Image (tube, grey):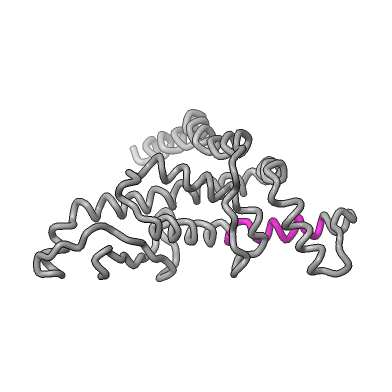
């Protein structure tokens, strides 16, 4: 009986429909990038290498956030903190691949500049910010494509889950920690307090618009 159950689980694992559904979900990112014509989010180079690469990915993340969360429930600080967390996650995934690509371009003589810094700047400003570069990269590295897409979805879903749980437990929080005083809505969610676990979740610090 145990062997039969294991075989059934293995058959489910091999079931093509599972992969078709997963591929359909992941393909949303490539479709978005292909159709994107707006103004990319400008990413600061502070602590972010190859910052120009992440503009369209951040716009996609913001778009997914809009589709998932009621915009009346979030503040500008909330959006900015979401973007800050998301770009850190994406950099952890993409950095090594981008380092490989900049070396490939340099070896092919496709970077302009008198020194390493000038060639790096040329790579960032003239090459990796183009959506054609991103599409080609996702095509060349399908595992990277999957990881980027899943990371964006997990981050969006986690922020949505926090908001949902907060609304369900808001009264209990107010009664237990604030003597029944209203705490308003979430002003921002600050990450960086633990490692990722359980599908991209981590310890978060929540700030309310009453200053708490």
Is 100 contained in the magenta span? yes
In-image side of 140 versus 177 (left or right):
right
Tell me which segment is drawn in magenta: 91-104
- Location of residue 128 in the rendering, given as x and y in whole percent from the top left corner: 71, 52
Give the main secondary structure of the magenta stretch.
Answer: helix
Is 103 contained in the magenta span? yes
Compare residues 109 and 55 and report the one nearer the observer.
55
> Can you say which quadrant of the picture contains the N terminus?
top left
Q: Is residue 54 above or below residue 192?
A: above
In percent of the image, x 81 and y 63: which residue is there? 119
Compare residues 2 and 153 and report the one nearer the observer.
153
Total of numbered circles in the picture? 0
> Can you say which quadrant of the picture contains the C terminus?
bottom left
- Location of residue 154 in the rendering, given as x and y in whole percent from the top left corner: 44, 50
Compare residues 34 and 152 and report the one nearer the observer.
34
In-image side of 156 versus 87 (left or right):
left
Q: Which quarter of the picture shows residue 33?
A: top right
In percent of the image, x 80 and y 60: which residue is there? 103
In-image side of 85 versus 209 (left or right):
right
In percent of the image, x 58 and y 61: which residue is there? 92
- Location of residue 208 in the rendering, given as x and y in whole percent from the top left corner: 27, 64
- Location of residue 182 in the rendering, given as x and y in whole percent from the top left corner: 15, 62
In percent of the image, x 75 and y 51: which residue is there? 127
């Amino acid at each position: 009986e145990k062997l039969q159950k294991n075989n059934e689980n293995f058959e489910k694992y091999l079931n093509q429909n599972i992969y078709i559904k997963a591929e359909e979900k992941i393909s949303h990112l490539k479709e978005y990038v292909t159709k994107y014509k707006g103004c990319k989010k400008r990413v600061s180079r502070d602590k972010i290498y190859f910052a120009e690469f992440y503009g369209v990915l951040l716009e996609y993340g913001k778009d997914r956030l809009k589709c998932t969360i009621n915009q009346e429930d979030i503040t500008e600080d909330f959006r900015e903190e979401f973007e800050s967390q998301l770009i850190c996650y994406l950099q952890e995934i993409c950095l090594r691949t981008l380092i490989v690509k900049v070396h490939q371009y340099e070896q092919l003589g496709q970077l302009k500049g008198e020194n390493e810094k000038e060639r790096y700047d040329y790579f960032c400003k003239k090459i990796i910010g183009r959506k054609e570069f991103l599409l080609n990269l996702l095509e060349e590295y399908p595992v990277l494509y999957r990881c980027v897409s899943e990371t964006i979805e997990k981050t969006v879903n986690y922020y949505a889950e926090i908001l949902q749980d907060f609304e369900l437990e808001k009264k209990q929080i107010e009664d237990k920690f604030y003597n029944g005083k209203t705490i308003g809505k979430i002003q921002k969610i600050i990450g960086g307090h633990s490692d990722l676990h359980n599908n991209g979740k981590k310890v978060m610090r929540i700030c309310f618009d009453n200053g708490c």
